[in-house]
Image (spheres, rainbow, N blue to C red):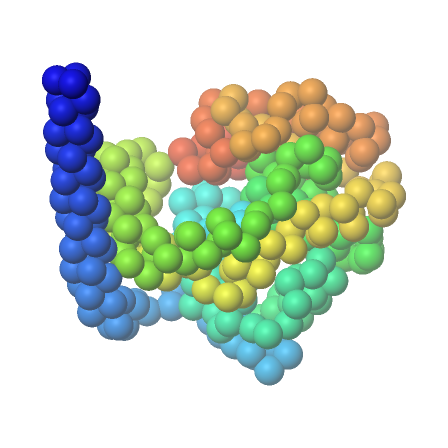
């Protein structure tokens, strides 16, 4: 009988503790949401675009360029990159010594508008081409995609091979279904909730705090780091969410299209590569490009272009020289 009473008291204590914890979480989220919404209202005001706006398909797209080389390299961002034209800045400054370099803020990222156009391979390629032409850049282009943009770049090369000099893949997503899982509506809703309540703001600040210590080594300015952090607090917009949810379909579409074998391809793979990818998958991906391809491995993580910009410039020059 004594054991039953003891267990009953313990259960009530656990219940009270659980209620207190739940209450603290609710209060925290309530305060965090109010603070986040107040900060978010004007957070991006005053951040000056670093490039130019071009109007395509009824929307404004932001692009940034450096250098005046004869060959044009087009940098294309990975999925979820909030401010591509500044996230690529150190690599752009390095490559601009030898090339004309252009970076694009996709619709739904950076300073570009949102769009209601479906996030398909065809639309991404149409937007990339339209933005480059509107900005005064003429083909052929050297496409340098990071992560997810590898899929759009492969599609670009298959549809407009005469406009592509080469592909240089920055740990790009392999055209292999095993590397990408469909993202459920539940997960997307949870991420949106975390952003709305300000939890994402806290995690972003913690991540950026650890990143600040290597700002100079990675070639970023303090202002660029601050701008990138602020834009990441607004990343989960409808355009970005649709891109995430349709990306698996984009991979499957490109898998079914043969790649033109006369376009040279170089893949730059980090020692700690993209989530879901293995060296076996990556090497299998390279066979798709035929004999006119090569791969190099650099120390780093999925964002291999952050901190390896000098090595990438040397590799690009050697590759194109060959």
Q: Look at 46% across and 29% down and name the residue there.
A: 301
Judge from the rendering whether residue 77 lies leftward or rightward of residue 128; answer left or right.
Answer: left
Q: Look at 76% across and 38% down and name the residue there.
A: 264
Locate residue 192: give its quadrant: bottom left
Q: Quadrant of the C terminus?
A: top right
- Relative to 130, say whether 18 is above or below: above
Q: Position of residue 243 (x, y in %)?
A: 59, 57
Q: Look at 23% across and 62% down and name the residue there.
A: 33
Q: Position of residue 37 (x, y in %)?
A: 25, 67
Judge from the rendering whether residue 163 lies leftward or rightward of residue 143; answer left or right.
Answer: right
Counting every numbered tag in the picture gives 0
Tell which residue pokes out farthest to the front in this image: 1
Residue sitting nearer the eye, 164 or 303 = 303
Q: Position of residue 3 (x, y in %)?
A: 16, 17
Residue sitting nearer the eye, 108 or 187 = 187
Q: Is residue 142 visible?
A: no
Judge from the rendering whether residue 55 lies leftward or rightward of residue 221; answer left or right.
Answer: right
Q: Is residue 148 visible?
A: yes
- Relative to 102, say whether 308 is above or below: above
Judge from the rendering whether residue 245 lies leftward or rightward of residue 212; answer left or right.
Answer: right
Q: Look at 76% across and 26% down and name the residue there.
A: 284
Q: Position of residue 303 (x, y in %)?
A: 47, 37
Q: Quadrant of the N terminus?
A: top left
């Amino acid at each position: 009988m004594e054991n039953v009473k003891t267990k009953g008291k313990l259960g009530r204590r656990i219940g009270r503790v659980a209620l207190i914890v739940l209450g603290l979480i609710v209060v925290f989220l309530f305060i965090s949401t109010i603070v986040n919404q107040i900060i978010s209202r004007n957070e991006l005001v005053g951040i000056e675009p670093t490039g130019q706006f071009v109007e395509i398909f009824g929307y404004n797209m932001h692009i940034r360029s450096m250098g005046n080389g004869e060959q044009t390299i087009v940098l294309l961002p990975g999925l979820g990159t909030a401010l591509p034209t500044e996230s690529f800045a150190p690599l752009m400054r390095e490559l601009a010594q030898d090339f004309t370099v252009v970076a694009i803020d996709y619709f739904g990222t950076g300073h570009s508008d949102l769009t209601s156009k479906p996030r398909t391979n065809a639309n991404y390629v149409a937007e990339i081409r339209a933005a480059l032409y509107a900005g005064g850049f003429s083909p052929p282009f050297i496409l340098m995609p990071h992560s997810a943009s590898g899929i759009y770049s492969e599609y670009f090369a298959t549809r407009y091979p005469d406009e592509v000099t080469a592909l240089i893949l920055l740990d790009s997503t392999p055209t292999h279904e095993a590397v990408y899982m469909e993202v459920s509506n539940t997960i997307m809703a949870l991420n949106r909730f975390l952003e709305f309540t300000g939890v994402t703001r806290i995690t972003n600040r913690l991540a950026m705090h650890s990143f600040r210590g290597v700002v100079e080594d990675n070639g970023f300015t303090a202002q660029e780091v601050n701008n990138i952090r602020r834009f990441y607090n607004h990343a989960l917009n409808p355009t970005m969410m649709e891109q995430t949810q349709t990306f698996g379909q984009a991979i499957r579409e490109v898998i079914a299209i043969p790649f033109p074998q006369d376009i040279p391809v170089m893949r730059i793979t980090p020692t700690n590569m993209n989530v879901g990818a293995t060296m076996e998958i990556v090497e299998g991906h390279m066979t798709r490009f035929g004999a006119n391809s090569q791969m190099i491995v650099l120390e780093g993580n999925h964002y291999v272009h952050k901190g390896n910009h000098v090595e990438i410039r040397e590799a690009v020059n050697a590759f194109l020289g060959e």
